[in-house]
Image (spheres, rainbow, N blue to C red):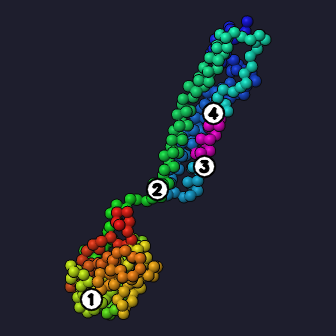
């Protein structure tokens, strides 16, 4: 009769654990579990640390160190789990040379299944830690996308820093007086205090042109926008946002040097040549009691090329 007939399935499953030739890790699985758990925890902390470092825009070496070390520890723990804690074979059984009966074979098969299932059940903590580490990695992997997109623009695409009463100043911050420009002259201006800022250079830059010495109306409804012959238009081309900095005085055209769009400054900067699809927005002006040029308000339409909420 086979030796297995005198043992329960659990006893059969524990035969290998009594083998003196097994590695110490196999005879002390709880110690190995603790070591693997520590690697999973450390890896999880480092992965979360990478997410934090990326969010605050830390130094590149910090990003590489936290992500690399975190993935390394998770990988080491997973390999150690498979090598030292999962069932290992082959298992050899000393038995009678004749084949066992069906009941014995069923008992042995049940023991193997129970032993393998027991390994998995006993490792719920490790499985949870591994799942937590991989889950954290999955969440953190979204951080580069979210962080790199930057803040939501909200309504910043519809407005500039021009406000009611804003002084027109040149690149040096000097306020523009109504007597500064001769007829036919052109000057790039900004709302006071923004000429040295990134946003000021990007969206606030405005072309100031003096067309005459009398009040000038470019379109119906804009009778007060051109005091003493001064008109002001956004410097951002409505095609691709290039700076419209060339002025053809004889033809009274603003010209974009990138794709040669031309805008007639006498009729509201309507494009009459080139790929620009819309007129340049006009800034309404007034002259204060001291003779300085100031803005009546912000632009009435968004500046620059179209975007997803503006066709």
Disc 3 from disc 4: Cα separation: 20 Å
Residue 98 seen by the camera: yes
Q: Which numbered disc flags the more N-terminal residue, 4 or 2?
A: 4
Foreground residue among 221 and 277: 277
Residue at coordinates 67% horizontally, 33% vertically from top-left? Answer: 83
Query: Cβ–Cβ below 8 Å for labels 1 and 4?
Result: no
Q: Secondary structure at mark 2?
A: helix
Give neighbour class at mark 1: few <14, some 14-19, many 20+ (Cα, 10 Å). some
Q: Secondary structure at mark 4?
A: helix
Question: Which picture quadrant has residue 99?
Answer: top right
Residue farthest right in this picture: 97
Disc 1 from disc 4: Cα separation: 82 Å
Q: Quadrant of the N terminus?
A: top right
Q: Nearer the viewer, mark 2 or mark 3?
A: 2
Disc 4 from disc 2: Cα separation: 35 Å
Return the mark for residue 81. 4
Residue at coordinates 24% horizontally, 77% vertically from top-left? Answer: 296
Q: Which numbered disc flags the more N-terminal residue, 1 or 2?
A: 2
Q: Magenta part of the protein: which range?
A: 68-81
Disc 1 from disc 3: Cα separation: 64 Å
Q: Which residue is mark 2?
A: 147
The location of residue 45, given as percent across then percent down, is: 53, 43
Q: Which numbered disc flags the more N-terminal residue, 2 or 3?
A: 3
Return the mark for residue 68. 3
Q: Which numbered disc flags the more N-terminal residue, 1 or 3?
A: 3
Q: Which residue is mark 1?
A: 229
Residue 201 seen by the camera: no
The location of residue 100, given as percent across then percent down, is: 72, 11
Residue 73 magenta-highlighted: yes
Q: Which numbered disc flags the more N-terminal residue, 1 or 4?
A: 4
């Amino acid at each position: 009769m086979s030796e297995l007939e005198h043992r329960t399935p659990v006893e059969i499953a524990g035969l290998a654990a009594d083998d003196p030739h097994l590695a110490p890790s196999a005879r002390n699985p709880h110690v190995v579990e603790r070591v693997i758990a520590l690697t999973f925890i450390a890896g999880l902390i480092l992965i979360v640390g990478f997410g934090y470092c990326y969010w605050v825009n830390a130094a590149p070496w910090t990003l590489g160190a936290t992500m690399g070390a975190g993935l390394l520890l998770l990988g080491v723990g997973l390999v150690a789990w498979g090598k030292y804690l999962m069932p290992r074979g082959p298992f050899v059984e000393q038995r009678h040379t004749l084949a066992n009966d069906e009941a014995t074979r069923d008992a042995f098969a049940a023991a193997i299944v129970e032993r393998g299932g027991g390994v998995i059940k006993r490792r719920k903590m490790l499985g949870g830690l591994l799942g937590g580490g991989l889950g954290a990695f999955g969440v953190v992997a979204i951080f580069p996308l979210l962080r790199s997109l930057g803040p939501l623009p909200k309504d910043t695409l519809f407005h500039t820093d021009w406000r009611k009463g804003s002084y027109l100043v040149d690149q040096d911050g000097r306020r523009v007086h109504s007597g500064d420009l001769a007829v036919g002259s052109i000057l790039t201006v900004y709302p006071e205090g923004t000429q040295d800022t990134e946003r000021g250079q990007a969206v606030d830059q405005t072309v100031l042109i003096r067309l005459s010495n009398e009040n000038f109306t470019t379109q119906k409804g804009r009778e007060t926008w051109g005091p003493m012959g001064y008109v002001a238009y956004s410097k951002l081309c409505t095609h691709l946002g290039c700076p419209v900095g060339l002025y053809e005085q004889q033809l009274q055209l603003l010209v974009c040097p990138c794709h040669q769009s031309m805008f007639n400054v006498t009729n509201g900067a309507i494009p009459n040549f080139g790929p620009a699809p819309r007129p340049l927005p006009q800034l309404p002006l007034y002259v204060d009691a001291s003779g300085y040029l100031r803005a009546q308000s912000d632009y009435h339409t968004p500046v620059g090329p179209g975007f997803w909420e503006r066709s």
